[in-house]
Amino acid sequence: MTDITQISGTTRVFAILADPIHHVQTPQAMNRLFSSMGLDQVLVPFHVSPSDLERVVNGLRGIKSLDGFIVTVPHKTAIVDLCDSVSEAARLVGAVNVVTRTCDGKLHGEILDGEGFVSGLRQAGIELEGRAVYLAGAGGAANAIAFALAASGIGWLTIANRSREKATSLVDRLAKAFPDLQVTVGTSDPSGYDLVVNGTSLGLKEGDPLPCDVTLLTADQVVAEIIMKPVITPLLAAAQKVGCRIHEGLPMLLCQIELMAAAMSSSKKESCHECV
């Protein structure tokens, strides 16, 4: 097993870009995986503000020992235009959370958020087929989750967002891609849905407003988060008080780790060694 603390001139480097960065748990999980696989690779956190994103990404292109990076809140939509190419899923969703760097500095973006979230629900035994789902948010992560939920066989999806324009745009794209799915723009009212999902960053910072009206939650609902820290967000705490089943944010990450590792440790990295 490779000791990730023994970084050398041959170590392949990956990064995660976020703002804030203190809450991320991907480096710990990814580095454990690299170590268990005996790979001379390391993933490090980069605190990057939105105003600096383009400058940082352009700089990363020139780091020949860098094979790629993970992108999280709030950069998932902004990064799309900074990539040279994106996968079909990322194009459809309009967001990217994994970027691989080729030998010549080209950047290719993919989106794995939605697949990871749905896999986490299924591993927890949460049924999706035919269910009615309320999703708060219309940003990068919410877009990915919305398309993955639509593909999972749910029967109804409501998108609620502070910007109604963004929610409407997401609903329109979902309706075109999944014509048999009932999809609507919602309000702050999550009542009547089988599954309530927070696809926003609300709850990450102390004092954040709640993503929906928690006074309307009922005990027969499942309430799910994408935020990993705090583990119990104000939304989940409110849901617990009502008697809802809760689903924490960590499973979404755990279900993405191997997908991310596969994307970032693909065979093309071998050609990058020739460029060093």
Image (cartoon, rainbow, N blue to C red):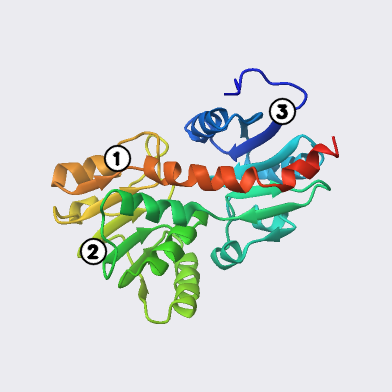
Q: Assess whether mark 1 and mark 2 are in contact (beta carbons under 8 angstroms).
A: no
Secondary structure of the residue carrying tag 2 is loop
Disc with the residue nearer the chain's start (1 vs 3): 3
x%, y% of residue 72?
Answer: 55, 45
Q: Amino acid at mark 3?
A: Thr
Secondary structure of the residue carrying tag 1 is helix
Q: Amino acid at mark 2?
A: Tyr
If the image is split into quadrants, where does the C terminus sit?
top right
x%, y% of residue 19?
Answer: 56, 38
Visible residue check, residue 199: no
Residue holding disc 1: 234
Q: Residue furthest bottom?
A: 179
Residue at the image position 36 percent from the left and 73 percent from the top: 184
189 horizontally vs 139: left or right: left
Q: Which label belongs to residue 11?
A: 3
Disc with the residue nearer the chain's start (2 vs 1): 2
Residue at the image position 46 percent from the left and 56 percent from the top: 114
Q: Look at the picture and state if 131 lies above or below 229.
A: below
Q: Which dot, 2 or 1, sits closer to the camera? A: 2
Q: Marks 1 and 3, how far apart in space?
A: 40 Å
If the image is split into quadrants, where does the N terminus sit?
top right
Q: Which label belongs to residue 193?
A: 2
Report crowding for label 1: few under 14, some 14 to 19, many 20 or more residues within 10 A (C-alpha): many
Q: Which dot, 2 or 3, sits closer to the camera? A: 3
Quarter location, residue 82: bottom right
Q: Amino acid at mark 1?
A: Pro
Secondary structure of the residue carrying tag 3 is loop
Q: Marks 2 and 3, how far apart in space?
A: 48 Å
